[in-house]
Amino acid sequence: MMRALTLCLICSWLAGCAVNPATGRTDFVMMSERQELDLGARYNQEILKQYPRYEDAKLQAYIQRVGERVARSSHRNQLNYVFTLVDSPDINAFALPGGYIYIHRGLLAYLNSEAELAAVLGHEVGHVTARHSVRQQSQSTAWSLLGHAAAIGTGVGAVGDLTNVMGNAFVRGYGRDMELEADGLGAQYLARSGYDPQAMIEVVKVLKNQEDFARAQAAKRGEAPAAGGYHGLFDTHPDNDRRLQEVIGPARALAVGNQEVGRDAFLQMLDGLVFGDSAASGIRRGRHFYHGELDFTLSYPQGWQLVNRPDVLIGHSADEQAFIAMTLEPADKRLSPAEFLRKRAGSQRLVAGEELRLGALQGYTAVLQGQSARRAAVIYRDDNAYLFIAAVRGRASLETEDQRFLEVIRSYRPLKADERKLAEPVRLHLVRAKAGQSLAALTKEVPQQGDGEAQLRLLNGLYPDGVPRAGDWLKTLR
């Protein structure tokens, strides 16, 4: 009886409700609008540390202008929306509470009109106006607090753990209903701001084509396709989905006269856009990595893949059982490389240590002992310390991959003069399609490995077998 009363009191205390400004429904929330705005501003500072802005003031201003146009037609047009182009090759866009919205240049590259850009930004504005992140956090907090209450009432901590797991599963991602709601709201905002709401469908086609291409490439390699993507909903969110058509349908009634698409002007804005890795983060080319600003290159075993993030470079085997990560830290010149590595290891014991001599560069490598042994190394260069950590998953011993790890570490060297061009990024360039011109002909100039023609088709909305029209602008890579 006492436990039931405790839970009832907690539930009563948690029951914060507010009318949703976009839907008019009463939602469960545990955050005021002021708290929402403060939370968004705080998170925005952290996001910008992880994802730097793309250095193109003209393009940033254009995205802000398009975003504001859509946001003015939203249910929360009083918010101060900030739209940011992120310098990342990922195909993604996301929103923080309070109106901070980000689109990665990786997604921007695949869009083909201003209306499609407005559709992406409108979708994210829909998440903000419907307070999806606030509702999500409120539900997560409620589950966590209820879990603690259950643990206190029963004296069994496992109950709290179980409830937290249930809560995390319940609110993981936005979920299909919230994504569809954001699509519907975004389509309304498109129509009200003068854009063609059909662009929302076109964006979903872009995402579906990405998924289809990834699935086809995985099948060629005999691998399972990677899960998720932008919103992680491709499999359940096709462009001909009946529910998607239903939520976007009402927006078409709001369209008056000729709704804007804006293809040519949009494409001109993309001319010269960095595609794939940027010079600031370094360039992946097959199993090699080149960084012009830091003046170095690394090589990885054949078949290994590279994950390039602002704060870490990770190479891993095809089966993802072996990993080697490299990070950059300030060098402490008061310490030798060996002393630096011992200090970084802390209480962990280093064994089998040896000095590294890489031309004029000095370093040190050793094995970190423990239940799962790891290879560690540091290379000093100027004021920087290049720190490597390598490990294998599961029960395999470090020895099964250690020679490969050492080869990667020892491959570090300054760039040669003829390699500097390899550290330059690939960029989008526009050409006019000629009568009878095939994409296969343009593929010969594509500086990308793999299926170059499929890549151009994806970029130009012609995947898998579309034909360009004479006179249309086409995106190429060089």
Image: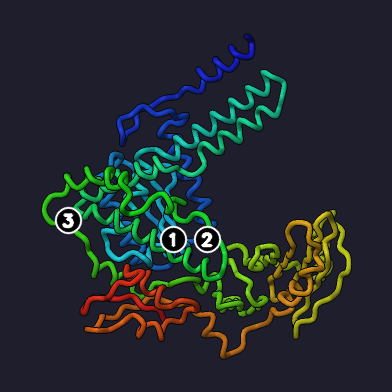
Q: What residue type is labelled 3?
A: Gln
* Mark 1 Cα-neighbour bin, 10 Å: few <14, some 14–19, many ≥20: many
Which label lies toward us, 3 or 2? 2
The residue located at (36%, 38%) in the rendering is 130
Residue 408 picture quarter: bottom right
Looking at the rendered image, the disc whose residue lies closer to the viewer, 3 or 1, is 1
Numbered circle sitting on residue 211 = 1
Q: Check contact, mark 2 vs mark 1: CB within 8 A.
A: yes
Circle nearer the N terminus (3, 1) = 1
Which of marks 1 and 2 precedes in the sequence? 1
Is 50 left, or right, of 271 in this rendering? right
Q: Please tell me which residue is depicted at 49% across the width and 32% down the height of the picture.
A: 138
Displayed quadrant of residue 354: bottom right
Q: Name the residue under label 3.
A: 259
Q: Name the residue under label 2.
A: 225
Instruction: Note whether residue 65 is visible.
Output: no
Q: How far apart are marks 3 and 2 (CA)?
A: 37 Å
Quarter where residue 114 is shown: bottom left
In the displayed structure, 36 sits above or below 315; it is above
Name which of mark 3 and mark 2 comes first in the sequence.
2
Are the residues tagged 3 and 2 within 8 Å (C-beta)? no
Distance CA(mark 3)–CA(mark 1): 29 Å
Q: Is residue 206 depicted above or below 167 in this figure?
A: below
Residue at x 46% of width, y 81% of height? 447
